Image (tube, grey):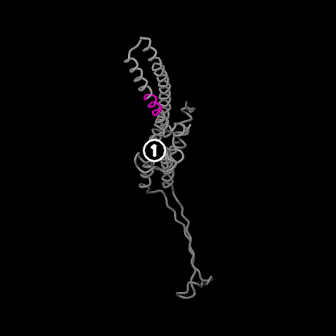
Amino acid sequence: PVQLTETDGYEIAVKHRLDLLHEIDRFEDSKRKVKVTANTLKADLNVFADASLVSEGPTDYAKFDLNKYRAGAGVQLNLPLDRLRERNNYRASLINFERQIRSLSLTLDDVRNDVRQGLRTLEQVRQNYQIQQNAVELADRRVEIAPLLLQAGRAQIRDQLEAQTAQFQARNALTQALVDYHVARLGLLINIGKLETGQDHFWTRDQPISKRGDAPATPGAPKDDEVIPPEKLFGK
């Protein structure tokens, strides 16, 4: 069982899912743009000043006379009399801000739904795996009992073959249930933004495995028929 609640998974997703973080950044940018465009509607007073030195010769830029300088200062006042373009920009920023609010709300709802559905799916496939385990145990007992019933004359060869077929099918179903569980687990990690795709966490082999009849594989690499246990492949 995964010790993760819907609320905890949602909080992890908000902090780590890149698509959600990108949507949050877009929302913050639209909010800042509203403040910037609103500021352009106000009157502004600009104060400016400048100063320069004159060189001694016409081309001697290494020597300056500190007593020969030129300075200037001024004030510029812009009154909000004609701000049609600024007003339109402000209204456009408000519309974009409201659009980003709706977009962020929808994204947050989708993330919460992804986490909720991921947890439910993972629990369902976990229970299905347990059911398939019980089915394999039952099929194994049927295979063990079938020869005894055959010797006692209470069963036929067909019954023994059917028990073996049922055992084979049950084991295949158990393997499929295990695969489904890990697929659901990886999907949940994607939903909360915590799927580690580094070499040590995700990939199972460093070197390609040679086929039978080809040159020997790299020393230490798994053989073609080697079964990698789930706890080593996916982690505990």
Q: Image height check: is 7 above or below 33?
A: above
Report the magenta residues as a range: 172-180
Res 83 quadrant in image: bottom left
Res 152 quadrant in image: top left
Q: Tell me what residue is drawn at x 58 percent, y 84 percent.
A: 62
Amino acid identity at mark 1: Gln
Image location of residue 143, percent across then percent down: 45, 20
| Tally of marks | 1
Image location of residue 31, percent across then percent down: 50, 48
Image location of residue 219, percent across then percent down: 51, 50
Query: Which residue is at the far left?
Result: 158
Residue placed most toward the observer, 130 or 167: 167
In the picture of the structure, the residue carrying the numbered disc 1 is 100
Image location of residue 95, percent across then percent down: 43, 45
Q: Image height check: is 55 above or below 97?
A: below
Residue placed most toward the observer, 196 or 73: 196
